[in-house]
Image: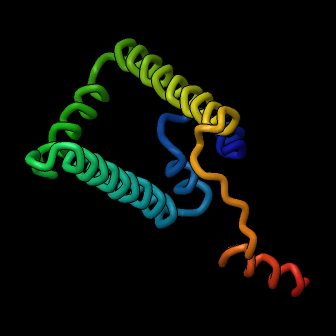
């Protein structure tokens, strides 16, 4: 990314990284990088929507997976098609929710760790499968 930033500073043009691939590596590299970027984003987006559908169906089994995925697809596209100021404000609030969730998970983990309510303590007297492997692997070195 740093090299891409340097290239943009040196040659500011309207376009993405596929422009630089086209200019410096040839038209085939530009074509492939642009379409590869698009196809991967489509595949990742559909995988995320499928995961949303599966989670929603886990909590509400009567809702079909395709319906919840379609609703989230429309909602995400509506957010992306709004004015830049609205999009930035929404991203700001979404990031606050993410940071609050991470902080609350860390706090809850510390509570479980230090309060003694974390469940039964188990000390691997026989090391278990992972421990046996680690012991064998350490001897190999």
Quarter placement of the N terminus: top right
The residue that appears at 10% across and 50% down in the rendered structure is 64
Residue at image position (8%, 47%) is 62
Its colouring scheme is rainbow
Q: Is residue 111 above or below residue 92?
A: below
- The residue located at (41%, 14%) in the rendering is 89
- Residue 4 as seen in the image, left or right of residue 99: right
Which quarter of the figure has residue 10?
top right
Horizontal side of residue 47 vs 100, given as left or right: left
Q: Nearer the viewer, residue 127 or 97?
A: 127
Could you say where residue 107 lies in the image, as x and y percent from the top left?
61, 28
Q: Which image quarter holds the C terminus?
A: bottom right
Q: In the displayed structure, would residue 7 be above or below residue 93?
A: below
What count of labels does the image hold?
0
User: Where residue 77 appears, x then y in whole percent?
Assistant: 25, 33
* Quadrant in the rendering for residue 83: top left
Foreground: 102 or 121? 121
User: Is 138 placed above or below 96 here?
Assistant: below
Q: Nearer the viewer, residue 5 or 78?
A: 78
> Measured from the top left, where is residue 41 in percent x and y?
38, 52
Residue 95 appears at what percent x and percent y? Answer: 49, 24
Between 31 and 102, which is closer to the camera in this rendering? 102
From the viewer's perspective, is 43 left or right of 28? left
- Residue 88 vertical placement versus 13 (above, below): above
């Amino acid at each position: 990314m740093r090299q891409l930033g340097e290239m943009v500073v040196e040659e500011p043009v309207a376009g993405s990284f596929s422009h630089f691939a086209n200019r410096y590596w040839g038209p085939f590299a530009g074509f492939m990088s642009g379409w590869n970027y698009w196809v991967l984003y489509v595949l990742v987006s559909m995988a995320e929507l499928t995961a949303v559908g599966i989670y929603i169906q886990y909590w509400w089994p009567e809702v079909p997976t395709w319906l919840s995925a379609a609703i989230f697809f429309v909602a995400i596209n509506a957010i992306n098609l709004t004015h830049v100021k609205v999009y930035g404000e929404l991203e700001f609030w979404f990031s606050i929710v993410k940071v609050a969730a991470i902080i609350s998970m860390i706090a809850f983990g510390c509570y479980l760790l230090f309060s003694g309510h974390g469940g039964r303590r188990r000390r691997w007297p026989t090391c278990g499968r992972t421990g046996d492997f680690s012991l064998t692997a350490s001897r190999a070195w």
